[in-house]
Image (cartoon, rainbow, N blue to C red):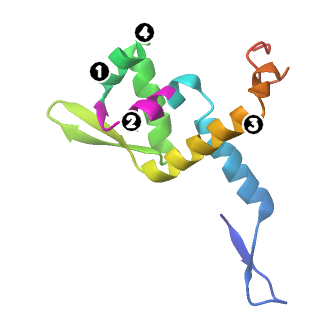
Amino acid sequence: MPMTTNTKATEPTVDEAAALSTAACLFRSLGDPMRLAIVRHLMLGPHRVVDLTRHLDGPAQSSVSAALACLRDCGLAESKPQGRASLWSLTTQPELLGLLASAEKLLAATGDQVALCPVYGTGAAS
């Protein structure tokens, strides 16, 4: 998070607008159902694209690769060569697990009301 020096105090202050923008980017990176499903599968351990495509039952391998590239670009996933394929894993598994667990608690507390949201809910216009 970008910080600036506060001349009146010795503690640095946080640029709140930049911090909120960065947080929104994180949530957008996890806001796609396929990327979220991939993250959940990677929680179980490293996977190849072909394995993820099979587990997700249906998307094209190119769509899975594009979703993985997004997660990589956001710093959430990484790949390592394994023969002719790449083995994908999470870079921040404990933190992501905590975030997803908190999200599940929040969804339970709100009764999944977010699904009814006219802007972001399941029935919202695309």
Residue type beneath disc 3 = Ala
Residue 12: quarter of image: bottom right
Where residue 58 is drawn, which disc sits there?
4
Residue found 39% across the figure and 35% down from its top: 42
Task: Point out the stretch of residues depicted in magenta.
Answer: 37-47
On whether residue 45 falls in the magenta region, the answer is yes
Q: Residues within 10 Å of mark 3 (few under 14, many from 20)?
A: few
Residue 112 located left or right of residue 75:
right
Label whose residue precedes the other's in the sequence (2 or 1): 2
Q: Quadrant of the N terminus?
A: bottom right
Instruction: Give the CA separation, mark 4 to mark 1.
Output: 11 Å
On whether residue 87 falls in the magenta region, the answer is no
Residue 72: quarter of image: top left
Give the residue number, with chain letter if any, for mark 1. 50
Q: Nearer the viewer, mark 3 or mark 1?
A: 3
Q: Secondary structure at mark 1?
A: helix
Residue type beneath disc 4 = Gly
Residue 21: percent from the left, percent from the top? Answer: 73, 50
Give the residue number, with chain letter if any, for mark 2. 42
Q: Secondary structure at mark 3?
A: helix
Where residue 109 is drawn, which disc sits there?
3
Q: 34 and 105: which one is in front? A: 105
Q: Mark 2–mark 3 contact, CB under 8 Å?
A: no
